[in-house]
Structures are given as C-alpha cells and as structure tokens.
Amino acid sequence: MEQEKVIIVKDLYKSFLDKHVLRGINLTLHRGENLGIMGKSGIGKSVLTKCIVRLIEPDAGEINVLGTNVLRCNEAELNEIRKKVGYLFQGGALYDSMSVRENLLFPIRRTQFVDKKREAEKLVESSLRSVGLLDAIDKMPSELSGGMKKRIALARTLILRPEIILYDEPTTGLDAVTSGEISELIVKIREEYNTASIIITHDTKCVKIATDNIKIMQDGVFVAEGTYEELSRSSEKGIRDYFM
Amino acid sequence: MRKVHVRNFKIRKFHVDEEVRNFYNGIFIDLGELAIFTGKVVKQFFQPPFEYKELIKQGYLIGNKSFSLISVTGFIMGLVLTMQMNPILSNFGAQTLLPGVIAVAMVRELGPVIAGLICAGKISSGIGAEIAAMSVTEQIDAMEVSGTKPLGFVVATRVLAATVVVPILVIFADAFSFLGAYLAINVFENMSITLFVNSAFDMLSFKDLIPATIKTFFFGFFIGLIGCYKGYNARSGTESVGYAANSAVVSSSLTVFVIDLIFVLIINIL
C-alpha cells in the first residue's frame, strides 16, 4: 500500500526582483519519509521550505500540506497547519530573552496545546529527554553551545508533536562529531514520533545517515533524485561532486 | 560640447524626478502598510491568550528605562523656563503669575511634547532594535511558523505598554518641571510651596489637562507601534537593526509633532 502523501508541491515559482529562484519545483513527501535536499548555497532551498509554511509567498504553484492547500487557506487554517509542521531554523532561533524551559513552554501556552501546567511541564521534560538535554532546562540560550542550541531548538520543534519537520541545514556550523549526533537524532525522532521530514543540507554525512531519498536542486529545479548510494555513484560528475 | 551638457542635464533631471517619485511612493506605501499593521495589532488586543505577564514586564522595562531621563529633563525644563521667564514678567510687574504661566506651558504643551520626543528616542528605538534583532535571527519567523502569533505576544504587548506608560511618564515630567520651577523661583525670591502650588493650579483648568492627557495616550500608542513596525519589517543583516532603530526614532518623533498639531487644531475648533 502506498504511503500517505503529506506534502505535495506542484510547479512552484518564486522570484526576488529579477532573480528567479524557484522555476517550477515539484515535490512529494510521504508519511515517515526523510527527504534530503542538496544544492549550492543561495540556490533557493530555504526559500522552498519557507514557501511550504508560507513564511514566503510564492509567485505561482500549488502547495498541499496534510490535505490542505496552504496558499488558499485563511489565517486560522494556516495556523492550524503550522502547528502540525515543525521548522528547525539554521541558527536555532531560540528566543534569547527566555530560558530553555520558557522557550519550550512558549508554543504550548500560546497555542493552548495542553490546558494544565503540569502536563505542559511533562511535555517539556519529555522533549528535552528526547534530545538528551534535560540538564539544560534552566539555562539561558546564551549559555549554550551551537550544538546544544540546535538540540534545544529541535526539542522546541517537537513540543507540539508535529507530523512533519522541516530541517534547514541542521548540522551547519557544527563539528563532525556533533553533526553526526544531530543526524542520528533526526533518525531517532522519525522513529519515535513517526514524522516525515525535509532536510536541507550540504553535509554528506547527514544525508547518508538521516535521509531515505535525496533531491539535487540546480537553477531553481530538481535535476536529480535518488538514494545516497544511487546519487553518490551517479554517472554525472556534477551530481557526484555533491557527495565528495 | 554644449550638446553634451544639455543631454547630461536631461538625464540628471530624469533621475531627480524618479527619486522624488520614489520618495513619495515610498511614503504612501509605508503609510498603507502601517495602517494594515495597525489593524492587525489592534485585532490582537482582543484575541486570547492575553499576555498580562509580558504586558507588565514591558511596561516596567519601558517606564524604568525612561524614568530618570524624563525626570531630569522635566526638572531642567522647569528650571530653565522659569529663569528665562522671570526677567520678562518682572518688566511688566507680573512675577506673581510665574508659577501659573509655567504650569500652563508645561502641562498643555511642553511637558507632553518634550516627554513624547524623549520617549520616541528612548522607547521607539529600543523596541525597533529589539524586534529587528529578533527578526534578523529568525525568532519572529520561529514564532510565526509554530502558530504562536508573534503579533500578539511581541507587538501588542509592547504597544499597549507604551500606550499606558507614556502618559504616566508625562505626568512625572510635569511634576519634576514644577519642582525645577519652584527651586528657580526661590533663587529670585522666597515663595512657599503652598503658594507656588496654589498659584500654579489656579491658572490650570480641565480644558488644559484633559486634551493634554488624551494626546499622550496617542503619543504612547504610536511610539510603541512605529517601533514595532520598523523592527518587525527589518530585513536580514545586522545593519537593518541599526536602520530600524534609527527610522523608528525619526518616524515616531515626527508623529509626535503631527499628533500635537492635530490636537491643537481640534482644540481651537472646539
């Protein structure tokens, strides 16, 4: 039986002034699938994920997330969809005026995800336990290392129990060991929470560990698709180069 | 040679026209976007969950940050105004009117406008820079994408806090200016505090107090709103933080004068 499609992107276009970033992107993400997207810097990978959650408005195309056309829904419907889609930003984007605990409690409180404070605290603890950083619960973001910030941001992403997670360069700026740990964490989260994910990365180790399929983006379109093994042994040098 | 000069002049003229057009277009686009932003923020005032804790925190921060500057400025304003007015009124033998004149000038116009301008500099720039930094580091996007409505938490609380706190700061500015005026009068002659207060409040009426107080709420609202708007719309890059703070100060200072002008016109009509 075919897996349920959780994200369907059809003919997506986006330009910034005269720079055409996305030129007819097509993409399908299935439930439980980890899809890697690779491509040169500044080519529009993050623009694509931001279009999916409508942080950026695309010029044309169709985006369907969990059965809802996000480009045609109203603000309330969009907010409901956004609660089901976690987004891990490149820099973590932790709220620097709040402690780790407050960072994690914030989305619960604002979205009224659970009513009781005790349940919210339990959720915070279980999310932090998932990323192995329960000890950092009362620290401020400024006291955390780059890897810890990414993990806490991931815990915050998990707190609303999303069905889809969009990872924007989850291992950028981290050392090889921490990158490996984050990549394994992505796999563990998929197993634990049954999430589907899009992982934007330049890190070959990360795509090897964490993804089922990879798409290569060039000039605003996907030019190749396959597993790590298939693409790293591609007959085209331009594709193989991404895995060097 | 002459032909070249004429052609250069035309090209230059075209650029100037285009720049002027872009400048005015920019102002109208900005005003339109600000109006839409205002609508969205006002809507958030009535949408749960209400962030009382954050509102109190922002109110405290805004008030605490500006209190010392406001009090010192108010005190000096009262002192200087009295020292300047005293010789003029003495020439007409009207020194006894001095407390009342200072009170009317400070309460009706100088207190609200000077305090408004200080708040525009201190509060609006602070809010603009803080929200711009949040925007640049994707904290606003992170709130947006988790469905937590950052307009309600980040913007509405700051705008409400500024709306409530700025009038209180203006009252303090007026009070400290009275203190400055009292001390300055006592440099020239002996006057008891009771006599000073009686003379000052004799000349003040509700017609002076009410419009002056109402306009300070508008000052506070727009100082908070413009700071938030500039910060919220900051583009990526650290220089946009400085730009947001700077343009917040310029726009909110200008708005203070415009609101003051509108109030003066309305009061004159009434």
Image (spheres, coloured by chain):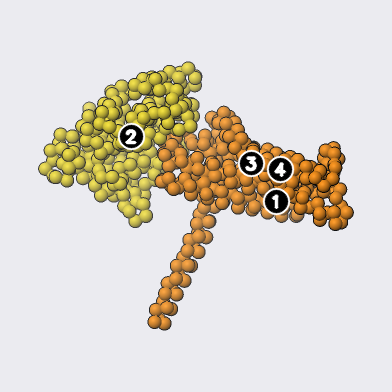
CA distance for labels 4 and 2: 56 Å
Q: Which residue lies furthest to the front in this view?
A: B187
Which color has been applied to chain A in this rendered view? yellow
Mark nearer the viewer, 3 or 2: 3
Of mark 3 and mark 1, the one earlier in the sequence is: 3
Q: Are dots 3 and 2 on a single chain?
A: no
Task: Answer with left or right where residue A229 lies relative to residue B164.
Answer: left
Give the number of the disc on residue B263.
Answer: 1
Task: Answer with left or right where residue B228 lies relative to residue B100.
Answer: left
Subunit of label 1: B
CA distance for labels 2 and 1: 51 Å
Of mark 4 and mark 1, the one earlier in the sequence is: 4
Subunit of label 3: B
Q: Position of residue B191 (x, y in %)?
A: 85, 42
Q: Relative to A218, is A37 above or below?
A: above
Q: Relative to B222, is B139 above or below?
A: above
Q: Residue furthest left?
A: A235
The type of residue carrying mark 4 is: Phe
Q: Is the Cβ of the residue at disc 2 closer than 8 Å to that at disc 1? A: no
Mark nearer the viewer, 3 or 1: 3
CA distance for labels 4 and 1: 25 Å
The residue sitting at 41% across, 46% down in the picture is B237
Tag 2: Cα neighbours inside 10 Å, few (<14), some, or many (≥20)? many
Q: Which residue lies furthest to the bottom in this view?
A: B2
Give the number of the disc on residue B69.
Answer: 3
Subunit of label 2: A
Secondary-structure class at tag 1: helix
The residue sitting at 13% across, 40% down in the picture is A234
Secondary-structure class at tag 3: helix
Q: Is the Cβ of the residue at disc 4 closer than 8 Å to that at disc 2? A: no
Mark nearer the viewer, 4 or 2: 4
Find disc 4 in the rendering and name its residue: B75
